[in-house]
C-alpha cells in the first residue's frame, strides 16, 4: 500500500486581469507562495509539474525564476483538467516512492479571450473541396451544430432535463445566482458582483439557456501546491503537520465509449467513474462532504455534476438544488468560492485553485466565507475531450 | 443537364430520399461519422456502412446567439436520436426560440443548398425539421 500524500502548502493568485504580468511571473507568485505557506524551499522539491494549455511546456522557465535545482519537470496538458493533472502527477511520484516533496503549478492567461472554440475552419477557395475527417466542403461550426463551449454545455444541461424533467431557463439561472452571490465573499475572485435572477436572465444570451453571467469567466491566474509524503511530514514541525491537508483520494479518468459520446461530449460517465473511485479510495461517501468545488464552467454543467458526483440521488439534481442544499448555508455547499462563473477560469490554474479553496476551509483560514467545522471536501474538474479529476481532501487530525 | 451537386460532408448521401450513413463496427455495431483505425468501443478493425434512419427525436438542443465571426446566428444546434443512433445537426424550418424548440420533439432529415462554387457546383447541407405528423 502506497503511503499517504499531504498538501503542505498551497496558494492561488488573484484571478482576473493581469495585463502587465506574464505566465511565468504569475506561476512564480503562486509557487513561491505555496512554498512559503508550507515552510519549505525550492531546494527541497524533488519533482515539478507545470500545467498550462495556451503556452505549452514552460516549467523550465519557472525554474529559472525560482530555482534551477536539476529536478525532473513534467509539462502537462489535459484541457480544463490540466491543473488537477499536474497535481496528480506529483502525487503519483510521491506514492511511487520517487519523491518526498513536489511542487505542482497551473497557470493561464485567457482574460478577454472570447469563446476559446468554434469557427475552427475558415471559408476557403472558390471551389468546393472535401477536406478533413468527414470530407467537409465548408466550415461546419454553425452548419452542423455548434463547436462553442457555451453551446455544448447548454445541450448537456438540456439533455439532463430531457431525461429527468424539471429543468428550465430560470432553474439554470438560479444556479448562477448562487455562485455569483458566493463570490462576494471571495477577495481573490475575478468578479464579486451579486446579480439578481432578473439581471442574469436578461443579460446577453450566449447559447440558450446560458446567458453571459452563466458562463465561466475567462481570467488570468495561477495556483500552486506543495505536496509531501506522510513519512516526511512526520519529521516536520507540529504547525506544519496541523496545517497539512490529507489527499484522501486523487483520481483521473477519461471518457469510456458510450453511444452518442462522439456527437455530444459525455461529461457524465467519466465524472461518475471518477467519483466512484474517489469515494472508494477515501472510504468516504458523499454524505460526509462538508463542501464541494465542482466544475461549473456553465450553469448548465453544475446541475449535471450534482448528480455525477452523487451529491443527490440519480435523476434528482433539480430537487436537490431547489432544496437549497448547495448554497453556502445548505447541506452540501457547492462552489462557495464563486465558482468558475465569478471566481474566473484561468484554465490550467482551475484544478489547483479549487483544491486551494477546499484547503482554506479545512484549515479554518477562509475568513468571511469559512464553512464552519469543515473537515472533508471534494474538488472536481473536467476537461473536454475528456479528462476528469477528482480530489477528496481531509483536515489533519487535531 | 442538372447542376452538379456535392454533399456538405461525406456521410450525407444525396439520393432521391437523402440519408446519412454511419461507419458501423462489424463486431459491436458501434457507429461513427468519421474514420476510426479501430473501434473505440471494442477494438475491432472491420467496419461497414450503415444507413441512419431519417427521422428521430430531439434529445438535446441549444439556441446559439453568439458565435465565431461569419457564422449566422441565431441557429439551433441539436442532438437527434435517430432510433438509437445519435446525430449532431442544426434544427431548421423552426423558429429559433424556446417556445418552438423543445426536447422530445419529433424531427426528420431535410437537405438544402448552402451555396454554389465558381464551377457551378451546388453544395448541399442537411438539418432536421419538425416532423409533419
Image (cartoon, rainbow, N blue to C red):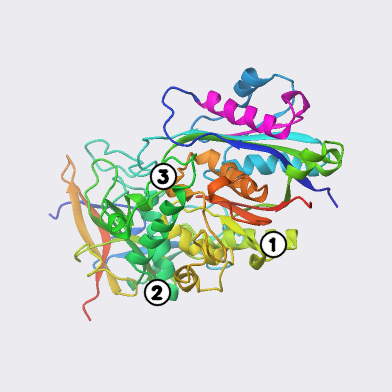
Residue A27 inside the magenta-drawn segment = yes
Nearer the viewer's eye, disc 1 or disc 3?
3
Task: State the residue in front, A202 or A2.
Answer: A202
Give the residue at x 74% y 59%.
Answer: A281
Q: Position of residue A131 (x, y in %)?
A: 36, 43
Question: Which residue in the structure is indicated by mark 1?
Answer: A279
Q: Which mark is residue A166?
A: 2
Residue A70 inside the magenta-drawn segment = no
Circle 3 chain:
A
> Pointer 2 and pointer 3: residues touching (CB < 8 Å)?
no
Main secondary structure of the magenta stretch: helix
Q: Is residue A5 shown above or below A151?
A: above
Question: Which residue in the structure is indicated by mark 3?
Answer: A192
Q: Position of residue A210 (x, y in %)?
A: 34, 56
Q: Position of residue A285 (x, y in %)?
A: 68, 66
Give the residue at x 72% y 51%.
Answer: A395
Question: Which quadrant would residue B83 be assigned to in this image?
Answer: bottom left
Tell me if A9 is positioned left or right of A397 in this view: left
Amino acid at each position: 500500500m502506497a503511503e499517504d500524500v499531504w498538501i503542505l502548502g498551497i496558494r492561488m493568485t488573484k484571478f482576473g486581469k493581469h495585463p502587465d504580468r506574464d505566465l511565468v511571473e504569475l506561476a512564480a507568485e503562486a509557487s513561491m507562495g505555496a512554498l512559503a505557506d508550507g515552510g519549505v524551499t525550492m531546494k527541497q522539491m524533488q519533482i515539478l509539474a507545470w500545467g498550462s494549455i495556451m503556452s505549452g511546456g514552460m516549467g523550465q522557465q519557472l525554474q529559472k525564476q525560482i530555482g534551477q535545482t536539476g529536478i525532473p519537470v513534467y509539462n502537462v496538458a489535459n484541457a480544463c483538467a490540466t491543473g488537477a493533472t499536474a497535481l496528480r502527477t506529483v502525487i503519483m511520484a510521491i506514492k511511487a516512492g520517487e519523491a518526498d516533496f513536489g511542487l505542482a503549478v497551473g497557470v493561464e492567461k485567457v482574460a478577454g479571450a472570447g469563446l476559446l472554440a468554434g469557427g475552427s475552419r475558415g471559408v476557403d477557395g472558390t471551389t468546393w473541396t472535401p477536406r478533413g475527417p468527414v470530407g467537409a466542403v465548408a466550415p461546419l461550426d454553425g452548419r452542423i451544430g455548434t463547436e462553442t463551449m457555451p453551446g455544448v454545455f447548454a445541450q448537456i444541461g438540456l439533455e439532463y432535463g430531457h431525461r429527468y424533467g424539471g429543468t428550465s431557463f430560470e432553474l439554470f439561472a438560479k444556479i448562477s445566482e448562487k455562485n455569483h452571490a458566493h463570490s462576494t465573499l471571495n477577495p481573490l475572485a475575478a468578479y464579486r458582483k451579486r446579480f439578481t435572477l432578473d439581471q442574469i436572465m436578461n443579460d446577453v444570451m450566449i447559447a440558450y439557456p446560458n446567458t453571459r453571467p452563466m458562463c465561466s469567466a475567462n481570467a488570468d491566474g495561477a495556483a500552486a501546491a506543495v505536496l509531501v509524503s506522510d513519512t516526511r511530514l512526520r519529521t516536520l514541525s507540529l504547525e506544519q503537520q496541523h496545517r497539512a491537508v490529507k489527499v484522501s483520494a486523487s483520481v483521473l479518468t477519461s471518457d469510456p465509449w458510450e453511444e452518442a459520446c462522439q456527437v455530444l461530449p459525455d461529461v457524465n460517465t467519466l465524472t461518475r467513474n471518477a467519483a466512484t473511485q474517489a469515494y472508494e479510495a477515501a472510504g468516504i461517501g458523499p454524505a460526509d462532504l462538508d463542501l464541494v468545488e465542482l466544475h461549473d464552467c456553465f450553469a448548465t454543467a453544475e446541475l449535471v455534476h450534482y448528480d455525477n458526483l452523487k451529491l443527490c440521488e440519480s435523476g434528482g439534481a433539480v430537487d436537490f438544488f431547489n432544496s437549497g442544499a448547495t448554497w453556502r448555508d445548505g447541506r452540501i455547499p457547492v462552489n462557495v468560492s464563486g465558482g468558475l462563473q465569478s471566481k474566473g477560469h484561468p484554465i490550467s490554474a482551475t484544478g489547483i485553485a479549487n483544491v486551494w479553496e477546499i484547503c482554506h476551509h479545512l484549515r479554518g483560514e477562509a475568513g468571511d466565507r469559512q464553512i464552519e467545522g469543515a473537515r472533508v471536501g471534494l474538488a472536481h474538474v473536467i476537461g473536454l475531450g475528456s479528462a476528469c479529476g477528482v480530489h477528496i481532501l481531509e483536515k489533519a487530525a487535531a | 443537364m442538372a447542376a452538379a451537386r456535392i454533399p456538405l460532408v461525406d456521410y450525407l448521401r444525396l439520393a432521391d430520399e437523402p440519408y446519412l450513413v454511419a461507419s458501423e463496427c462489424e463486431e459491436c455495431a458501434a457507429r461513427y461519422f468519421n474514420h476510426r483505425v479501430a473501434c473505440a468501443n471494442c477494438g475491432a478493425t472491420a467496419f461497414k456502412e450503415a444507413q441512419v434512419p431519417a427521422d428521430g427525436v430531439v434529445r438535446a438542443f441549444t439556441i446559439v446567439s453568439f458565435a465565431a465571426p461569419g457564422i449566422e446566428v441565431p441557429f439551433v444546434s441539436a442532438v437527434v436520436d435517430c432510433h438509437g443512433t445519435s446525430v449532431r445537426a442544426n434544427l431548421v424550418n423552426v423558429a429559433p426560440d424556446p417556445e418552438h424548440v423543445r426536447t422530445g420533439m419529433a424531427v426528420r432529415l431535410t437537405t438544402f443548398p448552402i451555396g454554389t462554387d465558381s464551377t457551378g457546383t451546388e453544395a448541399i447541407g442537411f438539418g432536421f425539421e419538425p416532423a409533419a405528423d
